Image (cartoon, helix red, strand yellow):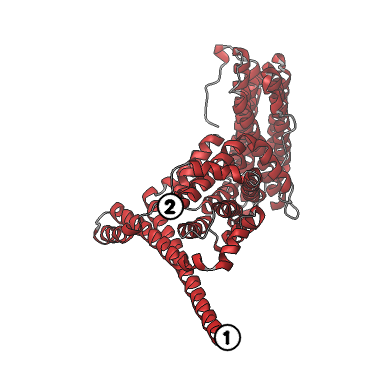
Amino acid sequence: MELPLAADHLAVIDFSWWNVVVGLLGGLALFLYGIEKMSDGLRAVAGDGLKTLLAKLTANRFAGVLTGTIVTMIVQSSSLTTVLVVGFVSAGLMTLQQSVGVILGANIGTTLTAQIAAFNVADSAWLLVALGFLAFAAGRRDFARQLGSVLIGLGLLFLALAQMSSATSPLRGYPPFLELMQRLEHPVLGILMGAAFTALVQSSSATTGVLLALSSQGVMTLPAALAIVLGANLGSCVTALLAGLGKPAAARRAAVLHLLFNVLGVALWIFLLPQLALIVESLPGDLPRQVANAHTVFNVSNTLVLIWFTGPLTRLAQRLVPPDPPAPGAVPPVEPRYLDEKLFTTPSLALDRVRLELGHAGEVVLEMFARSDEAVLTGTRGSLERVAEMDRDVNHLYAAIVEFTRKLARREMTHTETASLEDCLAVVNYLENAGDIVASNMVTQGLRRLEHQLTISAPTRETLQNLHRAVEGDLRDALTAFQQLDAPLAERVVANKVPFERSTRAALELLRRRLIADEPSRTRTFQMEVDLVAQLQRLHYLARRIAKVVALPSPEEAEPERTV
């Protein structure tokens, strides 16, 4: 008689497990859908301001924390915020340093879902769904429909929690499950369980939702719930790590930063779980509210501690993720040689380094200009492309120098040092303009020569090369004068304005006389030659502007400013 009863009892248990699993999975699916529905409405209300917020409000790490918190409250997913950050870093719209605060803020923002879900308002869930549907269906304006979507999502979230709570209620009388919950009070087991489940469902909010449902039935103890909360923070890193696959090194570093922060956060609290339990137990609320509060306390405290170590952690991420290897045949960009932020405490020394770096950038521009002579007049498409590629190095050094001087300008400096800083900014702009003239305008004329099979005559080629050598010589002297503060040399460059203009008038006169020559494509060739003379005039003007930084001309010799 006992054996059949035992079999019947097992059948009942199996049937109960089926109901529990199906009811829990169905409630979890509804929970995730509710979050998505609510998030869609919030994102629609935020509109394009969401990306603006992420891209702009990251001036410092503290503003980044606020930004990450707000954005995650809107999108209802720290993983999604981190994926957005990875995308911004990959596109160059955000630096790795700027991403730090946003990632920390994302961990705080994701706790809002748990705080909302911890309210025991299941009786009002259907009312929220009804009001939301009414606003969505009857609303004539987008705002009303978006608000309706938020209310529907919120109502579904509460219905899902009620469903998961109802489905798990039989577990209160199932000893094996209660024994499992006791085992999860061991921090390592709880953390592993939380990390695995969160990585599987790709949502730490889903993990928290299940915890709240189990807590409401009394089958989840607070120590086990705290360990699983810690693990959920680790599991949430998986989405960002996957998003970084195949992306540039900077994007992968942002994902690794997310992992580093969360790993360190767990390491900080794994031995302090009893203290965390005491903190949340001292706050008002039942067990589900304590779980939600623990999630918030954990992430806020981690942010308050780790935000002071963003520099070392960023450098660690850079070491863990090496830079991207150059593409086959590609030449790595020229890096700054002399800039050192350690000298910011002594602005005069930092300014000397800026002058040296400007000389370095000037060498690149001079080499680029020297190569352009033969490439434009007689070179191949390959030689022209190599000249154009050198502008990448000019732009790279330009950005580094401008960023260095921007930071230096925040320091307290004398009037003389401030004036010197402004001179450096003027010169770096002149060099960047010179690089653009060579890479864009002169190379374009060389490509046009190849496209239309134009030939420059020997006399014209010699004339253009003489002008080219004059510009190159004066540009080199101007840069030397600036680096060495050599006023007499600078004055000689400025004084070369008159002979150079005489040479350009002679060159243009030669080109006009040759316009009547009986040669194929004579008009098109003439246009190209005249444009090259004009570009050389612009470059000589820039050389004089650099020289005038050192040797200001007298009022009667001053040249009017013009756009180059």
Q: Give me the residue at 65% from left, 36% from top.
A: 309
Q: How crowded is mark 1: few (under 14 residues within 10 Å), some or many (20 or more)?
A: few
Quarter of the image where the N terminus is located: bottom right
**Three-letter code, disc 1:** Leu
Which one is in front, 93 or 235?
A: 235
Q: What element carries label 1?
A: helix
The answer to whether 554 is drawn above or below residue 57 in the figure is above
**Three-letter code, disc 2:** Ala
What label does residue 508 carry, if any?
Answer: none
What label does residue 118 carry, if any?
Answer: 2
The number of discs equals 2
Q: Is mark 2 on a helix, strand or loop?
A: loop
Quarter of the image where the C terminus is located: top right
Residue 207 position, x and y percent, is 53, 58
Residue at the spot of label 1: 3
CB under 8 Å between callouts 1 and 2?
A: no
Which one is in front, 31 or 494?
A: 31
Q: Residue 508 occupies which quadrant of the picture? A: top right
Residue 185 position, x and y percent, is 61, 55
Query: Is label 1 or label 2 in front?
Result: 1
Q: Give me the residue at 63% from left, 16% from top.
A: 417
Which one is in front, 18 or 139?
A: 18
Instruction: Give the mark, 1 or 2, whose residue is nearer the N terminus.
Output: 1
Q: Residue 403 occupies which quadrant of the picture? A: top right
The answer to whether 42 is drawn above or below residue 12 in the figure is above
